[in-house]
Amino acid sequence: DTGVSQDPRHKITKRGQNVTFRCDPISEHNRLYWYRQTLGQGPEFLTYFQNEAQLEKSRLLSDRFSAERPKGSFSTLEIQRTEQGDSAMYLCASSLVPAGGGYTFGSGTRLTVV
Amino acid sequence: AQSVTQPDIHITVSEGASLELRCNYSYGATPYLFWYVQSPGQGLQLLLKYFSGDTLVQGIKGFEAEFKRSQSSFNLRKPSVHWSDAAEYFCAVAGGNQGGKLIFGQGTELSVKP
């Protein structure tokens, strides 16, 4: 198993454009999580899925953000009408249920909005 | 709701000296507790985790942590720090729903003096 994969590693976009990120979790993990991390801060929870069901979404997540996990495998995170404040590292993680083995993180996608 | 506090934003220790990074959590029941390490521009690597049983847990790279329920703490320790340990360290807690979302502290940046 190659771990959690995220694509792309880096994304530069102009303000107002839409962007989509992809996460491929560890194949046997049924939970998948999205986090956002800004410089000097801990990762901030955005949302998570169990199989294809979205179980929780942060109240901090604006309507411009949407995530899907259509077949319970990979997931996409889309940001519409990007703003400069969206510039951050977006991290994906996966785990089993229960999370006895811990949460495995990908290397992240760094988004820069110019 | 669960939360994590890491009181020390930045710590500097000399190479070969001992290290203790503090972590306090808030959660109503017995939590799942984790320590992660992050090098600049990289994802998060799991150092160790606590779910139940022995309150002193051993991790990778010579790290250990002790769960103290009475103090709501999960401090990370290492007896002798190496220059390669310089990084950002995050304490995290997961709670209900067999793990659920992971909530992070703001992190402690460790610098190592030669």
Image (cartoon, coloured by chain):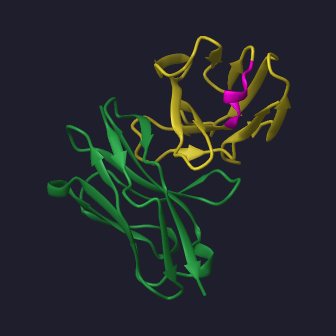
Chain colours: A yellow, B green
- Give me the residue at 73% from left, 38% from top: A109
Res. B68 image quadrant: bottom left
Is the residue A53 above or below the residue A96 in the image?
A: above
**Between residues B67 and B60, which one lies in front from this camera angle?**
B67
Task: Measuring from the top left, give residue B74's x and y in whole percent.
Answer: 31, 59
Left or right of residue B97: residue A78: right
Res. B23 image quadrant: bottom left
B26 inside magenta stretch = no
Task: Measuring from the top left, give residue B51's x and y in whole percent.
Answer: 31, 50
Q: Residue furthest left?
A: B70
- Give me the residue at 75% from left, 14% from top: A81
- Give me the residue at 59% from left, 11% from top: A63
User: Where the C terminus of chain B falls, by quadrant?
Assistant: bottom right
Is the residue B94 above or below the residue A80 in the image?
A: below
Q: Residue furthest top?
A: A63
Res. B103 image quadrant: top left
**Between residues B104 and A93, which one lies in front from this camera angle?**
B104
Is the residue A114 above or below the residue A19 in the image?
A: below
Task: Measuring from the top left, give residue B54's x and y in whole percent.
Answer: 24, 63
Magenta region: which residues?
A82-88
User: Where the N terminus of chain B falls, by quadrant?
Assistant: top left
